Image (cartoon, rainbow, N blue to C red):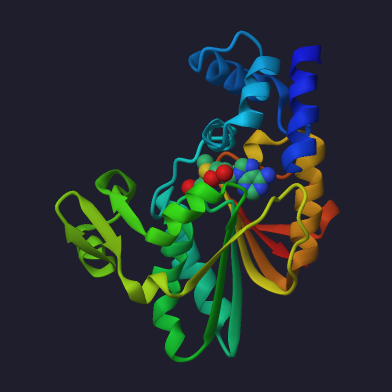
């Protein structure tokens, strides 16, 4: 690792507790270097020194660490499997269901879950927690305002049912909004909850080193109740899921055994 990058990640860790060494180095270095060059700095050291004095620049760095892009029902096929094959049996004869959308970005993922879970609310208590490391995306998520781009996987009647449309913006209906509680959480540092029926973590693990991913899978497994499900993104795979007590049941769905 070169000194400039090492200096940057050491300082960031001290200041924010964010551990960039657990992200793939080449990718992270490229993203940070390009951001610092774009902002007129010749080294990551000078970029960091300015960041210490300039909160807006620090926020910019936090939002550029990884990509924040999301969508409702992203990779629709998997959401259809969740709706048709997984949720009906998961909710059967249950009094409550506990769900975590980890690395939820601007809220499309937890609100997608809310739309699927809402019909069950008559007979079951639904707890839906959504977390991300980036406070700014969480603020956006709480607003629940989207452009058409985020809704491209949805059918027209779903858009009409789930949103209030005004001009080019779409406001998620308050009945879904109030189902989700948003919280800041770092998957690499924070403690995890327990007894989850479903953990959804998509399109973030791809940024982590193999060792970091292993730790996260172990912690997800410990957080699930027996029979609970881990739902991953289509870019993610688990090598040898049995080592974590997880069993593949469909593509990108794993059951805690
Ligand atoms: C590409 S988005 C994924 C959003 C959503 N899960 C989806 O699949 O559409 C990646 C998110 O991971 C978040 N993230 C990056 N590192 C994280 C960490 N260590 N802990 C929690 N969230 C993290 C980023 O802030 C970003 O919002």
Position of residue 75 relative to residue 173, above or below, is above
Quadrant of residue 145 in the image?
A: bottom left
Residue 177 image position (x, y, % from top left): 40, 70
Report ligand 1 position as a quadrant.
top right
Quarter of the image for the N terminus: give it: top right
Question: Looking at the image, which is closer to me, 237 or 198?
Answer: 198
Residue 192 image position (x, y, % from top left): 75, 62
Q: Which residue lies at the image location 65% right of the left edge and 25% below the top edge?
A: 28
Residue 113 image position (x, y, % from top left): 46, 66
Quadrant of residue 203 in the image?
A: top right
Position of residue 201 relative to residue 110, above or below, is above
Question: Looking at the image, which is closer to me, 80 or 198?
Answer: 198
Farthest residue, direction left: 167
Asked whether the viewer can see residue 107, the reply is no
Q: Which residue lies at the image location 38% right of the left edge and 54% below the top edge?
A: 72
Q: Which residue lies at the image location 39% right of the left edge and 81% below the top edge?
A: 119
Quadrant of residue 23 in the image?
A: top right
Farthest residue, direction top: 42
Q: Position of 84 compared to 251: left or right?
A: left
Asked whether the viewer can see residue 87, the reply is yes
Residue 224 image position (x, y, % from top left): 73, 68
Q: Which residue lies at the image location 68% right of the left edge and 71% below the top edge?
A: 196
Q: Position of 205 compared to 241: left or right?
A: left
């Amino acid at each position: 690792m070169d000194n400039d990058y090492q200096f940057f990640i050491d300082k960031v860790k001290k200041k924010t507790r964010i551990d960039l060494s657990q992200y793939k180095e080449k990718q992270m270095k490229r993203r940070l270097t390009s951001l610092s060059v774009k902002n007129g700095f010749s080294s990551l050291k000078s970029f960091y020194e300015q960041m210490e004095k300039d909160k807006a620049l620090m926020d910019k760095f936090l939002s550029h660490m990884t990509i924040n892009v999301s969508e409702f029902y992203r990779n629709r096929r998997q959401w259809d499997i969740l709706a048709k094959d997984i949720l009906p049996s998961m909710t059967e004869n249950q009094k409550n269901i506990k769900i975590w959308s980890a690395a939820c970005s601007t809220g499309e993922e937890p609100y997608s879950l809310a739309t699927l879970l809402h019909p069950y609310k008559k007979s079951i208590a639904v707890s839906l927690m959504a977390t991300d490391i980036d406070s700014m995306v969480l603020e956006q998520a709480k607003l629940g305002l989207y452009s058409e781009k985020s809704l491209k996987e949805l059918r027209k009647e779903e858009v009409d049912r789930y949103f209030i449309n005004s001009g080019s913006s779409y406001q998620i209906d308050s009945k879904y909004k109030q189902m989700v509680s948003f919280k800041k959480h770092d998957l690499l540092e924070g403690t995890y909850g327990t007894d989850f029926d479903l953990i959804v973590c998509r399109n973030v693990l791809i940024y982590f080193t193999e060792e970091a991913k292993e730790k996260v899978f172990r912690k997800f497994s410990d957080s699930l109740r027996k029979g609970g499900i881990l739902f991953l993104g289509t870019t993610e795979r688990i090598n040898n899921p049995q080592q974590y007590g997880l069993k593949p049941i469909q593509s990108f769905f794993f059951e805690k055994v």
